[in-house]
Image (cartoon, helix red, strand yellow):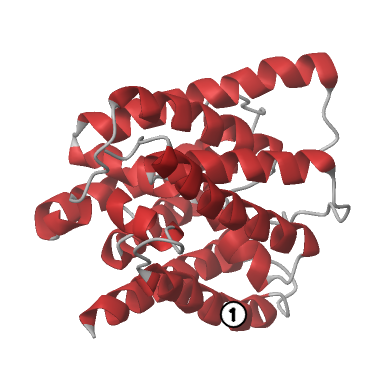
Amino acid sequence: MNEYVMPLFGGALIGLAASLMLYWNGRVTGISGIIYGATVAPKKGDVSWRWFFIFGMLFGGLLLKIFLPLSFVEPLPTAHWTLVVAGLLVGFGTVLGSGCTSGHGVCGISRLSPRSLIATVTFMVAGIMAVVLFRSMGIYE
Amino acid sequence: MKNKIAAFFVGLLFSLGLGISGMTRPLKVFGFLDIFGNWNASLIFVMIGAIAVHLVTYRIILNQKLPLFSDQWHLPTKKEITLPLVIGSFLFGVGWALAGYCPGPALTSLSSFEFRPALFFASMIFGMFGFRLLDRQFNFKR
């Protein structure tokens, strides 16, 4: 049962975080966009809050590392080069596609945005198909 | 300043949600996408939990005149379904399956001081940089 309660509780926290971002700052919580605007494409006067968000996430990661180290177990049994390829795809794809799991998957769907619905279905289907493809290539061994 | 402290707190809460829910475990994410193999459906509850909360709060919050720490709403305005939206999301999905990381969990996992999420994250920034260079040439209608 814990297997479902923890995801549900964690998900509710994510929904609460997105709600607070909207209530306080009037923004959607799109993490790929926040990172892009903090690092690669900074716009004047629209940078520092992004770094505060990023440091908040890093601080949360530190708390997890200390109090819930099980958060960071179960790496994939893949070669290091796959992480490079995956990172390039995720970085390029999320900016081209205007969002990731947080901005489209959580915030966009909650806003009933047709763009986000299409994006979410697309990256889910792509991910499911990619697992089949990569397994047949022996990537996960 | 208030909006910055707010952003810090939101980032903190968000990352705790990701860690507690299991989104920072690549093998779990893989299992979630592996519906034709050994499917582990548990992560669908992350989305259900997050959307159940935000679907309701979104409507309540937007009844306010303005956000608490900003003099305007900053919500996405694009409506059109574009090719870049679909292609970009597709590429993201492929990368997500390959590494088991999406951007939020990757950022959170930097604090584990492990090599793998750091390598992924650095590559992700390079990917974003590559997009920026191409975008200057082609000016994608995203």
The answer, for residue B95, to whether it is visible in the render is yes
* Residue B118 sits in quarter: top left
Q: Residue at x 32, y 67 (%)?
A: B21
State the SS at label 1.
helix
* Residue B84 sits in quarter: top right
Quick check: A100 left or right of B77?
A: left
Residue A30's spot in the image, x, y percent? 58, 51
Q: How many marks?
A: 1
Quick check: A140 left or right of A23?
A: left
- Rendered view: A120 above or below A52: below
Q: In the image as oriented, which residue stretches furthest toward the right?
A: B80
Residue B101's spot in the image, x, y percent? 40, 45
Q: Residue at x 58, y 20 (%)?
A: B129
Q: Nearer the viewer, residue A134 or B5?
A: A134
Look at the image and tell me in which quarter the C terminus of chain B lies.
Answer: top right
Quick check: B128 left or right of B137?
A: left
- Rendered view: A126 above or below B20: above
Q: Residues within 10 Å of mark 1 (few under 14, many from 20)?
A: many
Q: Amino acid at mark 1?
A: Thr
- Residue receiving disc 1: B57
Q: Nearer the viewer, residue B131 or A47?
A: B131
- Rendered view: B62 above or below A79: below
The answer, for residue A94, to whether it is visible in the render is no
* Residue B76 sits in quarter: bottom right
Q: Residue at x 53, y 50 (%)?
A: A127
Residue B24's spot in the image, x, y percent? 31, 52
* Chain ID of residue with mark 1: B
Residue B132's spot in the image, x, y percent? 67, 21
Q: Residue at x 27, y 43 (%)?
A: A76
